[in-house]
Image (tube, rainbow, N blue to C red):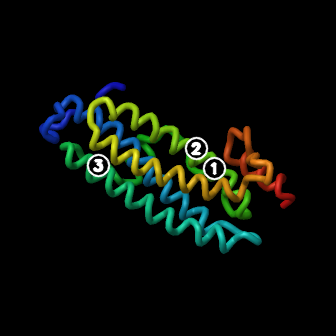
Amino acid sequence: MATSTTPHYTVPGVSTHDGGRIIDVLSTRLHALNDLSLTLKHIHWNVVGPHFIAVHEMLDPQVDRVRAMADDTAERISALGGVPHGTPGALVAERSWDDYSVGRADAIAHLGALDLVYTGIVEAHRAAVAEVGKIDPVTEDLLIEQLRALEQFQWFVRAHLENSGGSLSQAGARTEHEAARSARQDTGR
C-alpha cells in the first residue's frame, strides 16, 4: 500500500511513516463505516412487508454501534497525527464502491442485499487488521473489536436468510439486486 499521508507527529513507538500507513488504512475504514451507517438507515426507512418491524428495530442498534465505530476510528486517526475526513464529499471521492442500490423493498430483499454489504465490510476490515497488525497492535485491537461486532451484525442478517438446511437464500449472488431477488424468491415473496 502506498503511503499518501505522513503526519508531522504520531503516537510514541510508531514512526511517522508507519503512522501515515495506518492513517491511510483507517481513512478507508472511516469512509466504509460512515457509508454503512447511512446504508443501514436507508434500509431502516425503506423496508416494508411482513418482517418490517423486526428488521426496522434490528437496524437501529446496528446504526448506533457503527456510528460509534466511525467515531473511534476518526479519533484514532487524530491520535496518530492525521486528519479524519468525515464529509460526504470526501467519502464519495475516496471510496471504491457504489452506493447501496436497493430502494423501497421488502425486508427479506433488503437483508439479502445487506448481507453482501456486510461481506464487503468484513473482508475489508480483515485486510486492514492484517495490514496494521504488522506495525501497531493498538490499532489492530480497535479494528478487531469492530470486526467482532460487524460479524455479529452479519450473523443477525443471515439468520433471516438461512434455511433449515443451513444454506443462505442468496448464496452466490454478486450484486445487491441479484441478492435481493434471490432472497425474495427463496422465501416465496
| Three-letter amino acid code of the residue under disc 1 | Asp
Left or right of 34: which side holds 119?
A: right
Q: Residue furthest bottom?
A: 53
Determine which residue is flagged by label 1: 115
Q: Are marks 1 and 2 in contact (CB under 8 Å)?
A: yes
Left or right of 93: which side holds 172?
A: right
- Residue 164 is drawn in which quadrant? bottom right
User: 47 or 10, which is in the foreground?
Assistant: 10
Determine which residue is flagged by label 2: 119
> How busy is the neighbourhood of tag 1: few (under 14 within 10 Å), some, or many (20 plus)?
many
User: Residue at position x 37%, y 31% from top?
Assistant: 131
> How busy is the neighbourhood of tag 3: few (under 14 within 10 Å), some, or many (20 plus)?
many
Q: Residue furthest right?
A: 188
Q: Is residue 171 above or below residue 187?
A: above
Determine which residue is flagged by label 3: 84
Q: Position of residue 158 (x, y in %)?
A: 66, 53
